[in-house]
Amino acid sequence: MVFHDDGPVRNALPPFNDDAADLILRSTDNVDFRVHRQVLAVASPVFADMFDLPPPSPEIGGSVDEHRDGLIVVHMAEDERALRLLLGFFYPVMEPILEDLELLKLALRLAQKFQMQGVARYVQPGLKLLAADAPEQVYAVASAYNLRSVALVAARASLSRPILTKGRIPLYPEFTDVSGFDVLRLLRFQQACSERAVDAVMDLRWLRRVEIPFKDAYKGYGLVWQTCDSGDKCVHALAQLPLKLEDAWTFKPKPWVMTYLETARGALHDSANSAVLERFDTLRPAFEEASLCTSCGKIAASALLNFARLLTSRVDAVILQVELESAM
């Protein structure tokens, strides 16, 4: 049942006060929108079907429609804000500006109710922009309305702080409209991305020898990662373990390189977001260990930062390969 205010009726602002209109849509807060039947019928099958229905007959228990200025008044279930948004999709001069999540959700509800197929092209760009700040909410909205590309963008944005690492899990109202499958799908996506990211850091067989940072900075026979100006006097010299790269090429990096890899692994386990690889908190343990040798301390910062950038590119690449699962 639709309830309307008992207050005075107001006219909507342009362009919905056109004298050439042939129909009035009245909002629940008593705002009259003067519109054109043909425009509504072309844009929405719901309106087209409504206009095809015969008018009710008093002789068979029907009621006479309300009129104003000679036009039929249709009482709508939407308020002024919702009706203006709805009609903005019908009239080219009124293309809606969708800037916040609540407005985008309203647009999707209206599009579903009035069976408007073209609204998604207005809504999807806005949802993707909001995904950076509200990834879980955008994911839920996209899942509820089967906007798969938006759901994937939001799922990837959620990797910066996965749901299960938030401490007290937020109870987002947007999840009332999604299935249990959609919730599990997001959790499995975050888990899969974390596993792929950790694997990329712990198994470096993807890394080619020519890609090693400072590949041109040779000290005698070895690379910067495994030699320094202190030579055999380096405090790290006896603790170097072999590491395999592409084509089974093996070298022995300094222990502070391995410390960085282990710290990076832990960071990616909590958040499959490549940005953690270049954060100071992730790099600091390796910096501190490298500083135990004066020579290593001089080269560690630049060497590790270059290495972090390589890892970042690799992690981004493997995460892009992870897709949201579909229902069986």
Image: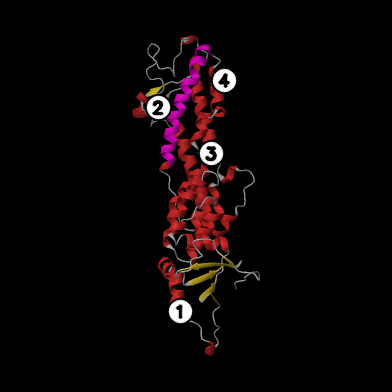
Q: Is residue 28 left or right of residue 295?
A: right
The residue singled out by tag 3 in the image is: 271
Up-down relation of residue 275 to residue 255 (above or below):
below
Up-down relation of residue 306 to residue 195 (above or below):
above
Q: Is residue 93 left or right of residue 235?
A: left
> Which image quarter is the N terminus in?
bottom right
Q: Nearer the viewer, mark 2 or mark 3?
A: 3
Describe the colour scheme in one phrase.
secondary structure
For the record, the magenta segment spans: 293-319
Q: Secondary structure at mark 3?
A: loop
Q: Callout 1, which amino acid?
A: Leu
The residues tagged by marks 4 and 3 sit, at their Cα atoms, a distance apart of 23 Å
Q: Secondary structure at mark 2?
A: strand
Dividing the picture into quadrants, the one containing residue 10 is bottom right
Q: Secondary structure at mark 1?
A: loop
The residues tagged by marks 4 and 1 sit, at their Cα atoms, a distance apart of 79 Å
Q: Secondary structure at mark 4?
A: helix
Whole-percent x, y for residue 74 in the image: 53, 73
The residue singled out by tag 2 in the image is: 244
Q: Nearer the viewer, mark 2 or mark 1?
A: 1
Residue 290, visible in the rendered structure: yes
